[in-house]
Image (spheres, rainbow, N blue to C red):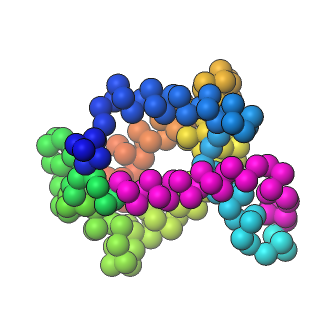
Amino acid sequence: MDFLTQPWPWYVAGPLIGLAVPLVYLYAGRKWGVSSTFRDVCAATFPKNLDYFSYSWRDRGSWRLTMAVGLVIGGLIAGLTGPAEVMISEATRADLSALGITDFGGLVPSEIFSWSGLATPAGVVLIVIGGFLVGFGTRYANGCTSGHAISGLSALRVTSFVAVLGFFAGGLIATHLLLPLILGGGS
């Protein structure tokens, strides 16, 4: 039962993710992405006075709600059976330590992702403003990273390719320029 408690190698996990796309197309005949699933969950639960969520989510396929439940259950299983500490390289630990991040005992550093971390200026920027920008960008790009990178690229969509390039460029800029400025380690 080691496969339940250890990270799976890339050559197993990657093909399994790749196989998920044709299975979703065969099962539902639709594109797959987390942001559209999240929108359906909101449309099923929010009051109908918000125009963005005023549509029949059932017409889009209730399979998305099943997927959302599966994501939550999968996350719970991973949290209960996975390693207690995220495995990152010593070079990354050194870089993060230079920025003031020293807690490597869980899935995310508590210096940022905690109630006390949220009360700091860096926490507000990273969690609140960052969360708003992720949500805005997802709608503006007409999909999220999983939808574009997994579903869109497998369908050979040029717009998804451009979006994925933007995600990577934005990630590099955020990691190497913005994060050091936000956490006070920038020069």
Quick check: 33 left or right of 175? right
Task: Name the spot of residue 187 as percent of width and height, x first.
Answer: 27, 51
Quick check: 68 left or right of 28? left
Q: Which residue is painted at 18% across and 41% down in the image?
A: 89
Is residue 68 inside the magenta stretch?
Answer: yes
Quick check: 126 left or right of 48? left
Q: Which residue is painted at 29% across and 55% down in the image?
A: 81
Question: In the rendered view, would you say 164 is above or below 6?
Answer: above
Question: In the rendered view, would you say 33 is above or below 29?
Answer: below
Q: Quadrant of the N terminus?
A: top left
Question: In the rendered view, would you say 7 is above or below 22?
Answer: below
Q: How many marks?
A: 0
Question: In the rendered view, would you say 1 is above or below 98?
Answer: above
Is residue 40 inside the magenta stretch?
Answer: no
Q: Which residue is painted at 72% across and 70% down in the image?
A: 45
Task: Name the spot of residue 99 as percent of width and height, x first.
Answer: 23, 56
Residue sitting nearer the eye, 1 or 56: 1
Task: Name the spot of residue 98 as percent of width and height, x first.
Answer: 18, 54
Residue extending furthest toward the top? 156
Whether residue 46 appears in this view of the structure is yes
Residue sitting nearer the eye, 83 or 4: 4
Q: Quadrant of residue 68?
A: bottom right
Residue extending furthest toward the front? 1
Tell me the chief SS of the magenta region.
Answer: helix
Quick check: 134 left or right of 176? right
Q: Which residue is painted at 48% across and 33% down in the image?
A: 17
Task: Name the spot of residue 179 as percent of width and height, x first.
Answer: 36, 53
Q: Which residues are magenta?
A: 51-78
Q: Quadrant of residue 29?
A: top right
